[in-house]
Amino acid sequence: MRPDLEVADVFHRHWADYRRDHAGHLGRVERRVMAAVEACRTAALGGHAEHCTNCGLVRQSL
């Protein structure tokens, strides 16, 4: 069972703002790791999103 909140969820919601606010302090390695976490369970890595038409739930699936 998937937890209610994962690290990737936080990255999806806040990564753009964080990257903008801390651009001068993020190295190449940090940016690559954060991008990999954000891509986790997405189409970029072979996953897909399941959408419930009744309740609107969106669930990432591999």
Image (tube, grey):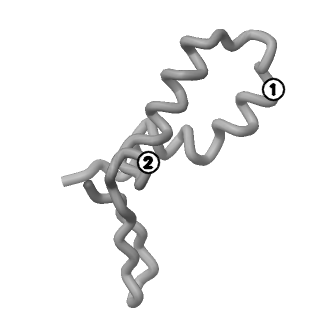
Q: Is residue 47 above or below residue 5?
A: below
Instruction: Say the numbered circle drawn on residue 44.
Output: 2
Query: The N terminus appears in which quarter of the rendering?
Result: bottom left
Question: Which residue is found at the position 72% from the left and 28% from the top?
Answer: 19
Mark 2 element type:
helix
Kindly identify the amino acid type of the residue bearing the numbered disc 1: Asp
**Mark toward the viewer: 2 or 1:** 2
Question: Which residue is found at the position 80% from the left and 12% from the top?
Answer: 24
Query: The C terminus appears in which quarter of the rendering?
Result: bottom left
Kindly identify the amino acid type of the residue bearing the numbered disc 2: Ala
Q: Is residue 43 above or below residue 9?
A: below
> What x and y, as percent, mark residue 22?
77, 20
Instruction: Say the numbered circle drawn on residue 21.
Output: 1
Give the quarter of the image for residue 14: top right
> What x and y, as percent, mark residue 32?
54, 22
Question: Which residue is found at the position 41% from the left and 73% from the top?
Answer: 57
Position of residue 8 in the picture relative to residue 45 (left or right): right
* Label 2 to label 1: alpha-carbon separation: 26 Å
Q: Is residue 1 above or below residue 49?
A: above
Dot 2 alpha-carbon crowd within 10 angstroms: few under 14, some 14 to 19, many 20 or more: few
